[in-house]
Image (cartoon, rainbow, N blue to C red):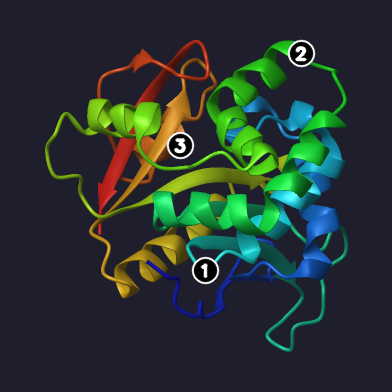
Amino acid sequence: MAAGPAVPTRRPTTAGRVLVVRPLAPDDVETTAALQASAPPSGALDVPAALGVGFLRRWHLAHLRSPHAVALVAEQVDDDAGRPATGPRATGVLLAVLDRRAHREHLLREHGPGLAAGLAGAPLRTPQALGRWARHHGGPLVQAVTLLPTRGGAAARARRAVSGGAPVPLAVELEQLVVDPAVRGTGVGRQLLASLAAQGAGVGLTRMEVRVPWGTGAEGFFTACGWTASATRPSARGGFETPFHRDL
């Protein structure tokens, strides 16, 4: 499923500025990668900040160029004329997937070797976090480098195990939501999620889903935003996670 064109949204903030949510652009990636690299674990959700700015730049670019993903950035401007506010250009970034299988195949085909190279060069500031991410994503990256097939076998068995053989709802999967700590509590995260919901509904998806690592403190945010939690369970990335969803 391919993403439709995202329409920028604007709303006033408590500081008298205007919050703009728009599609991520290549010129934003330097800032958004740095924003995520400094984020606490609850902000990254999926890709840990320990992988470093170099890898995160590649990761953000790969998502904004995928027709099966959504990449949004939030920024504050001084007024509706669009003049940038004082401070960082980007105050939040969101990455999501509309079609997991198609997106993964796009990453393997178009970005796999580059992502693998970025992963190999990632700083080992937090080896445990790097190991958890590699266990979850490393297989596809290895496939990209070695040109191994991407369908069937263990991957198909894993998909069947997750779905239990039942039809899986057409869902947009939230991968990353990072907000600058300086503007948390001002509605940046909520506006990013609202824009994602509008885009998901626009292409016929029926719900949004996210897996929140247990103990990160992000559970309260999603509950406050109207998401419903399922039972906490062991995570393929290590530790535990709580799935959340919200119908569109």
Q: Quadrant of residue 123?
A: top right
Q: Secondary structure at mark 3?
A: helix
Amino acid identity at mark 1: Pro
Q: What percent of the width, then of the height, locates residue 7? A: 51, 80
User: What x and y, as percent, mark residue 102?
Assistant: 44, 57
Q: Residues within 10 Å of mark 3 (few under 14, many from 20)?
A: few
The image quarter containing residue 234 is top left
Mark 2, residue position:
127
Q: Amino acid at mark 3?
A: Phe
The answer to whether residue 30 is above or below residue 1 is above
Which residue in the structure is indicated by mark 1? Answer: 67
Q: First in sequence, mark 2 or 3: give its number.
A: 2
Marks counted in the figure total 3
From the viewer's perspective, is 4 left or right of 216?
Answer: left
User: Which residue corresponds to the image point at 37% horizontal and 24% vertical from the top-left?
Assistant: 242
In three-dimensional space, the C-alpha distance between marks 1 and 3, rounded to whole angstroms, equals 28 Å
- At 38% from the left and 26% from the top, the residue drawn is 154
- Residue that badge 3 annotates: 221
Let me know if residue 160 appears in the view.
yes
Q: Quadrant of residue 28?
A: bottom right
Q: Is residue 4 above or below residue 107?
A: below
> How far apart in space, not on screen, are marks 2 and 1 (Cα)?
32 Å
State which tag comes first along the sequence, 1 or 3.
Answer: 1
Verify CB contact (< 8 Å) between mark 2 and mark 1.
no
Q: If the image is split into quadrants, where does the C terminus sit?
A: bottom left
Say whether residue 156 is left or right of residue 149.
Answer: left
Task: Name which residue lies at 57% across and 37% down.
Answer: 140
